[in-house]
């Protein structure tokens, strides 16, 4: 695949070790989530408030999705906007280490109920995200002519800060450090800002660049890129106090429930635009990234329909519906899209760094740099796509028939994450081999 470099500041890219440490860690957390499903089975699907369910949710949101998105932002900011993250290597080391420890401690705290683990989780996650948010904010502030992607990143970071503050507040109340009223409304707002704000707005902002570049589609329409992220962010700002007012008995539930339809409709418009652009792409052959993105975009519309269904009187006593909505949001949409992004970002970065070094050493004809397909072959990525789709199908059935589908879903998730990890390691190993060949060439001159 030919990637245009004219609009990218590739010379600003951080060392490849910066994003790769996050990308390699993400599927390991996915394997831990799979292990939880295999061990606890139907217990995870009894209630969203079950300790094992909370542990599983945070292994996916913080461990899998969070790692990928933090690594991607550190890589994309200097490349897409020419604004490198300050002191990126020590920042990446600190953030990666703190988030890893904090996520493991939080999951263990939910499972064991040990207060000390919650204290460790809150301190490490709080410090890790503080370092990340400050570093990314400095890079974003330095950008003098922001485009739609940069605006999206700024709003996503603001959403992340809100999510983290809410999470730390809820964690302090959950662990008994402080007394906390309205725990359920605050938790729902925390979830809303995390999924619809941090994850959703960042995916939209990045999509404006990576979908046309990697999937060879036309550009997103200006009327969408110019306003959608702002509308979504403003809708969440208004929704949060409305939801808190319902929690304190000051408003009926239908008021915040009706308002939240605004961002969900906005995401559905984005999904429809993305599917239309993919239909109009210059290259008609489907690839793995395209199929992952299509899966996510179709499920955005499905989530809107499921949300509308959840508001009907017949669905009020159906605990499977909110569980299914969470599964589709986290695994069906967020995990599908980020997974698909990895299959372009990882081989592209490996190819780019090797090619740059080859040019600098003038070793053309002496050391062959593999192309993106050679770094991550389709036959390997296809297997993981099938495992991901099978897992999504099993997870969809699991809330309604927890036994045996929760165990089967755990097995499928384990296979999917193991294949993703092996594919990333395959590209990393091939990169290291060719990089060593270039080092040998350099030393032989």
Image: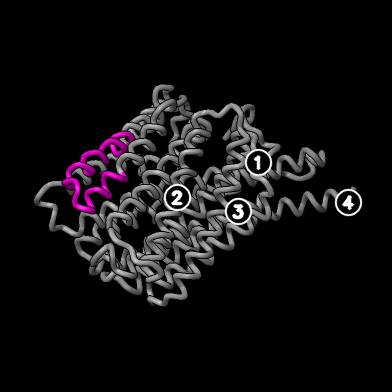
Asked which quadrant contains residue 176, the reply is: bottom left
Q: Considering the whole magenta stretch, tell me its main secondary structure.
A: helix
- Residue 236 locus on image (x, y percent): 34, 41
Q: Which residue is mark 1?
A: 84
- Residue 297 locus on image (x, y percent): 35, 39
CA–CA distance between discs 4 and 3? 29 Å
Callout 1: 10 Å neighbours few (<14), some, many (20+)? many
Q: Circle 3 — which element?
A: helix
Quarter of the image containing the N terminus?
A: top right
Q: Is residue 440 visible?
A: yes
| Residue 245 lies in the magenta-colored region | yes
Question: Total of numbered circles in the picture?
Answer: 4
Q: Which residue is mark 3?
A: 20
Residue 444 is tagged as: 4
- Residue 52 locus on image (x, y percent): 34, 69
The disc, 4 or 1, on the residue closer to the chain's N-terminal end is: 1
| Of the two numbered discs 2 and 3 in the rendering, the one whose residue sits closer to the viewer | 3
Q: Which residue is mark 2?
A: 382
Q: Circle 2 — which element?
A: helix
Q: Nearer the viewer, residue 274 or 154?
A: 154
CA–CA distance between discs 2 and 1? 34 Å
| Of the two numbered discs 2 and 1 in the rendering, the one whose residue sits closer to the viewer | 1
Asked which quadrant contains residue 285, the reply is: top left
- Are discs 1 and 3 less than 8 Å apart at CB? no
The disc, 2 or 3, on the residue closer to the chain's N-terminal end is: 3
Q: 371 above or below 278?
A: below
Q: Nearer the viewer, residue 182 or 7?
A: 182
Q: Circle 4 — which element?
A: helix
Q: 357 above or below 128?
A: above
CA–CA distance between discs 1 and 3? 17 Å
Q: Residue at x 43, y 27 (%)?
A: 225
């Amino acid at each position: 695949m030919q990637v245009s470099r004219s609009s990218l500041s590739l010379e600003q890219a951080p060392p490849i070790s910066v994003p790769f440490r996050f990308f390699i860690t993400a599927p390991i957390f996915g394997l831990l989530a799979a292990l939880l499903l295999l061990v606890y089975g139907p217990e995870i699907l009894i209630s969203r408030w079950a300790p094992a369910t909370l542990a599983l949710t945070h292994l996916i949101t913080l461990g899998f999705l969070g790692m990928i998105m933090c690594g991607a932002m550190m890589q994309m900011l200097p490349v897409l906007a020419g604004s490198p993250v300050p002191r990126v290597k020590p920042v990446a080391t600190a953030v990666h280490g703190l988030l890893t420890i904090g996520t493991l401690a939080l999951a263990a705290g939910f499972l064991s109920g040990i207060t000390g683990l919650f204290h460790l989780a809150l301190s490490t996650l709080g410090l890790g995200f503080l370092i990340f948010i400050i570093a990314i904010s400095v890079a974003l502030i330095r950008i003098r002519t922001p485009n739609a992607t940069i605006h999206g990143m700024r709003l996503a970071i603001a959403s992340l800060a809100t999510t983290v503050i809410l999470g730390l507040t809820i964690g302090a109340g959950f662990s008994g450090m402080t007394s906390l009223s309205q725990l359920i409304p605050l938790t729902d707002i925390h979830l809303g800002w995390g999924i619809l704000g941090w994850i959703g707005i960042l995916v939209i902002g990045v999509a404006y660049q990576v979908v046309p570049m990697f999937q060879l589609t036309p550009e997103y329409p200006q009327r969408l890129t110019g306003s959608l992220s702002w509308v979504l962010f403003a809708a969440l700002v208004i929704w949060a106090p409305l939801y808190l007012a319902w929690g304190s008995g000051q408003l009926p539930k239908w008021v915040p429930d009706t308002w939240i339809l605004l961002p969900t409709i906005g995401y559905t418009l984005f999904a429809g635009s993305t599917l239309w652009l993919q239909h109009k792409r210059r290259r008609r052959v489907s690839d793995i990234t395209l199929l992952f993105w299509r899966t996510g975009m179709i499920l955005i519309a499905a989530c809107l329909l499921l949300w509308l269904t959840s508001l009907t009187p017949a669905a009020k006593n159906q605990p499977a519906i909110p569980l299914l909505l969470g599964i589709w949001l986290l695994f069906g949409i967020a995990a599908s899209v980020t997974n698909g992004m990895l299959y372009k970002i990882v081989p592209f970065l490996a190819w780019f760094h090797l090619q740059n070094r080859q040019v600098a050493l003038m070793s053309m004809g002496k050391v062959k740099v593999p192309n993106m397909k050679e770094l991550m072959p389709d036959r390997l990525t296809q297997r993981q796509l099938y495992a991901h789709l099978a897992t999504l199908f099993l997870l969809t059935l699991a809330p309604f028939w927890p036994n045996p589908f929760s165990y089967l879903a755990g097995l499928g998730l384990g296979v999917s994450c193991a294949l993703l990890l092996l594919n990333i390691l395959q590209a990393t190993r091939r990169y290291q081999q060719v990089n060593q060949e270039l080092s040998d060439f350099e030393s032989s001159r």
